[in-house]
Image (cartoon, rainbow, N blue to C red):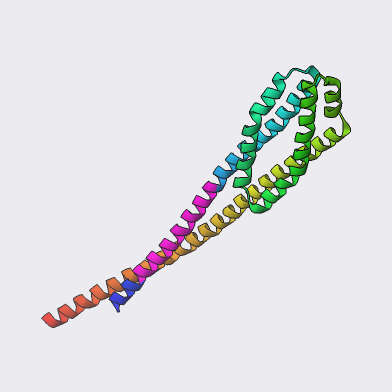
């Protein structure tokens, strides 16, 4: 049945081509989204590392010099840094967000110690403030906070790389699928061509027989 053959071939061609195109397009969009998110997270990570260094140096300068302009710079920049941290938590998985919150205890302790040092500076007790900032507790909490942040950022990078590898594998499989379906499509249409050719030949033979 020529009509049935053509119908099945067209339907099969549309199904195979549509499935292959949809898979590749979906994977490509996901890959693009992941790359964009990676760039955003890398930018945020760089900002957080800068923030950590900024607060450390600002606090030391305040304790060393007793100049309250450093506290003002600290307080002015704090809201921006907190907003950057929120952006990071919003863009990572719940598991990574929970991991990031493990540094909260160290961060809160650091804020408490820094607040004490700032108050002592205002009271003219610069030596006592410097003793807090240079003390063992502050140094320990700072190390815990910094190392915790580095581990979180490293896990974020590992997560992104794993996603990229996953998309690469999916894209590779889709390309193999497309490579397999192309010969099938060509073969199907060759069969249709052969069926049409035979139909025309038989039709012409019938017409000749009728004329004779």
Q: In this view, does 207 lie to the left or right of 75?
A: left
Judge left or right: residue 193 versus residue 149.
left
Image position, residue 194 (x, y; %): 32, 71
Residue drawn at 77 percent across, 35 percent down: 112
Q: Quadrant of the C terminus?
A: bottom left
What residue do we see at 61% from left, 37% from top?
A: 83
Main SS, magenta residues:
helix
Residue 111, magenta (yes or no): no
| Left or right of residue 16: residue 84 | right
Task: Please tell me which residue lies in front, 171 or 9.
Answer: 171
- Residue 130 appears in the rendering: yes
The answer to which of 114 and 103 lies nearer the viewer is 114
Marks counted in the figure total: 0
State which quarter of the image contains the N terminus: bottom left
Residue at 78% from the left image edge and 18% from the top image edge: 66
For residue 143, above or below residue 121? below
Examine the rendering and report whether any part of residue 212 can be seen. no
Place of residue 211 in the rendered image (x, y in percent of width and height, measured from the top left): 11, 80
- Percent from the top left, x then y, of residue 48? 67, 35
Task: Specify start and end residues of the magenta stretch as a single range.
Answer: 9-33
The answer to whether residue 31 is above or below residue 193 is above
Q: Farthest residue in the front direction?
A: 123
Give coordinates of residue 188: x percent, y percent: 39, 69
């Amino acid at each position: 049945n020529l009509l049935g053959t053509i119908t099945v071939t067209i339907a099969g061609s549309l199904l195979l081509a549509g499935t292959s195109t949809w898979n590749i397009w979906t994977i490509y969009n996901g890959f693009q989204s992941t790359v964009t998110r990676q760039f955003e997270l890398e930018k945020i990570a760089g900002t957080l590392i800068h923030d950590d260094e900024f607060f450390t140096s600002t606090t030391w300068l305040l304790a060393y010099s007793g100049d309250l302009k450093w506290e003002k710079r600290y307080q002015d920049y704090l809201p921006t840094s907190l907003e950057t941290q929120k952006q990071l938590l919003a863009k990572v998985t719940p598991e990574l967000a929970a991991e990031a919150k493990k540094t909260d205890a160290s961060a809160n302790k650091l804020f408490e110690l820094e607040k004490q040092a700032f108050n002592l500076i205002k009271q003219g007790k610069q030596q006592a403030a410097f003793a807090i900032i240079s003390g063992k507790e502050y140094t320990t909490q700072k190390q815990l906070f910094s190392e915790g942040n580095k581990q979180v950022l490293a896990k974020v990078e590992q997560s992104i790389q794993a996603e990229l590898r996953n998309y690469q594998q999916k894209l590779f499989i889709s390309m193999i699928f497309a490579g397999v379906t192309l010969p099938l499509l060509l073969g199907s249409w060759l069969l249709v061509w052969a069926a049409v050719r035979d139909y025309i030949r038989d039709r012409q033979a019938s017409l000749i027989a009728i004329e004779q």
